[in-house]
Amino acid sequence: MESGAFWEGKTPCWDIMECSPLLKETCPAYLDQGCPCWDILDTACDRLLGTESTCDVCAVYALYGPPANDGAALAGS
């Protein structure tokens, strides 16, 4: 399966998390490669690791997630 727009030029989550071929084939993040995994419900990580609410500590999210909102953008307001 070809990588979608989001994962183009990036190491996809299923490689970072070292998912087995069987797990990849059943994971919505692998099946819909146009979106980041944290925007997709019921991923393999959600089901097996319970990471749905802990993306902030995930290695994939740390690499590719949106930058933390530290209030710097509001400093000049």
Image (spheres, rainbow, N blue to C red):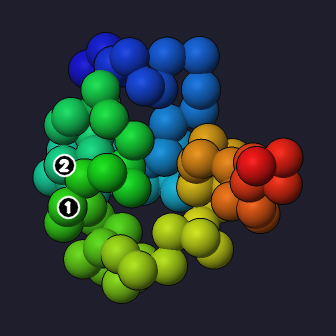
Name which residue type carries label 2: Pro
Residue farthest toward the front in the current orientation of the protein: 77
Q: What percent of the width, then of the height, locates residue 33? A: 30, 30
Q: What percent of the width, then of the height, locates residue 1? A: 26, 20
Query: For this view, does 26 lie left or right of residue 64?
Result: left
Of the two numbered discs 1 and 2 in the rendering, the one whose residue sits closer to the viewer: 1
Asked whether residue 22 is in view, the answer is no
Name which residue type carries label 1: Leu
Q: Where is residue 75, by image quadrant?
A: bottom right
Residue in the picture at 47% in, 26% down: 7
Q: What percent of the width, then of the height, locates residue 59? A: 65, 60
Frontmost residue, 9 versus 48: 9
Residue in the picture at 18% in, 49% down: 28
Q: Which residue is labeled 2 in the image?
A: 28
Above or below for 43 versus 65: below
Query: For this view, does 57 lie left or right of residue 38?
Result: right
Q: Which residue is labeled 1 in the image?
A: 41
